[in-house]
Image (cartoon, rainbow, N blue to C red):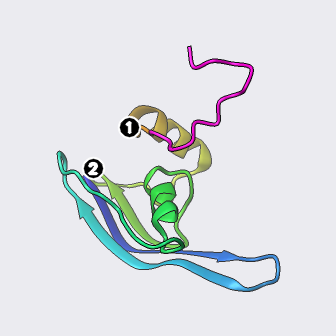
């Protein structure tokens, strides 16, 4: 269902310094499989989750979701794909203080 092939993500700080958040990550998660991601702070867990959820794009590599390469989708295509195929449960809900969840 989810396949990553050589995924890397690089950021450039305002100082011009390059940060390699992910380097050459390959992974396969089959339908029905449960996966836990653990690691030290700064190890790339959030970066990887943002890439898997199409909230960010990889610098290089391929991301296949059900056999479809989604690593190069436009912003609009990513939004449509997330709407139909991806679900999120956020650790922090960022609800408006004046509005209840209901």
Residue sitting nearer the eye, 49 or 4: 49
Q: Is residue 67 left or right of residue 86?
A: left
Q: Is residue 92 magenta?
A: yes
Task: Using a 10 Å C-alpha cutoff, classify the residue at mark 2 as few (fewer than 14 neighbours), some (14 to 19) or many (20 or more).
Answer: few
Q: What residue occupies the far bottom of the structure in this picture?
A: 17
Label drawn at residue 85: 1
Q: Tag 1's secondary structure?
A: helix
Q: Position of residue 96 (x, y in %)?
A: 71, 27
Q: Dots 2 and 1: beta carbons under 8 Å?
A: yes
Q: Is residue 102 above or below residue 53?
A: above
Task: Using a 10 Å C-alpha cutoff, classify the residue at mark 1 as few (fewer than 14 neighbours), some (14 to 19) or many (20 or more).
Answer: few
Numbered marks: total: 2
Residue at horizontal 48%, vertical 74%?
43
Answer with mark 2 or mark 1, whichever residue precedes in sequence: 2
Q: Is residue 38 magenta?
A: no
Q: Is residue 88 above or below residue 65?
A: above
- Distance from Cα at disc 2 to Cα at disc 1: 10 Å
Q: Position of residue 71 (x, y in %)?
A: 46, 60
Kindly report the secondary structure that dominates the magenta region of the rendered protein: loop
Residue sitting nearer the eye, 77 or 33: 33
Q: Position of residue 56 (x, y in %)?
A: 57, 57
Q: What residue occupies the far right of the structure in this picture?
A: 15
Please state the extent of the stretch shown in magenta in the rendering. 89-102
Residue at horizontal 58%, vertical 51%?
74
- The quadrant of the picture occupied by the C terminus is top right
Residue sitting nearer the eye, 30 or 42: 42
Residue at horizontal 51%, vertical 36%?
80
Label drawn at residue 66: 2
Residue at horizontal 18%, vertical 51%?
33
């Amino acid at each position: 269902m989810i396949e990553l092939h050589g995924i890397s993500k690089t950021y450039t700080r305002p100082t011009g310094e390059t940060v390699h958040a992910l380097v050459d990550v390959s992974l396969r998660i089959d339908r029905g499989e449960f996966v836990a991601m653990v690691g030290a702070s700064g190890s790339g867990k959030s970066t990887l989750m943002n890439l898997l959820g199409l909230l960010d794009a990889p610098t290089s590599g391929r991301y296949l979701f059900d056999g479809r390469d989604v690593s190069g989708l436009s912003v609009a295509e990513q939004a449509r794909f997330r709407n139909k195929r991806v679900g999120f449960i956020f650790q922090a809900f960022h609800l408006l203080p004046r509005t209840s969840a209901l």
